[in-house]
Image (spheres, helix red, strand yellow):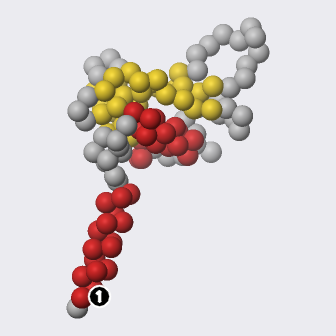
Amino acid sequence: MHRGKSAILVLMMSTCTVNAAVKSETEACTMLTDAAKKKHLSAMEDPEGKYYCWLYSTSKKYFVFQLHYHFDVPRDWVGSDLVGYYAVRKNDAAIFEWNLGDDSLGKNLNKFKVRQ
């Protein structure tokens, strides 16, 4: 009987660590850039490029970032490296699109299909 309770406790602890709270802006940015790589969010993505974040705003519940993608381009290239705005929820690290027009949550990034 004691072994069963221990197994349940270990299972509960491992489940909690998967969706752990985000403690800092840096940690939230790392989670966002890792998710962006997995989901191939940039149309220009190549192995030499790199995602990075700029903090747009923060609240009790979210870190909101501008997500950018840096890659080498010709000198006369004109364009933006902005991929979009994304929110990282502090209590469980869930990532959402951020609607800039009304500062509200959009689609959950975990529900996006991976580009091929």
User: Considering only vertical position in the picture, is 21 above or below 47?
Assistant: below
Q: Position of residue 70 (x, y in %)?
A: 63, 25
Q: Position of residue 101 (x, y in %)?
A: 32, 17
Q: Say left or right for 83 vs 3.
A: right
Q: Is residue 32 visible?
A: no
Q: Say left or right for 60 vs 97.
A: left
User: Considering only vertical position in the picture, is 15 above or below 109?
Assistant: below
Residue 56 versus residue 44: which sits nearer the camera? 56
Q: Position of residue 79 (x, y in %)?
A: 62, 13
Q: Say left or right for 39 vs 12.
A: right
- The residue lying at 49 percent from left, 39 percent from top is 30
- The residue lying at 38 percent from left, 40 percent from top is 95
Crowding at mark 1 (Cα within 10 Å: few <14, some 14-19, many 20+): few
Q: Outermost residue, bottom direction?
A: 1
Amino acid, disc 1: Arg
Q: Say left or right for 103 vs 78.
A: left
Q: Position of residue 113 (x, y in %)?
A: 49, 46
User: Considering only vertical position in the picture, is 89 above or below 4?
Assistant: above
Tag 1 residue: 3
* SS label for mark 1: helix
User: Considering only vertical position in the picture, is 94 above or below 81?
Assistant: below
Q: Outermost residue, right direction?
A: 74
Residue 61 versus residue 99: which sits nearer the camera? 61
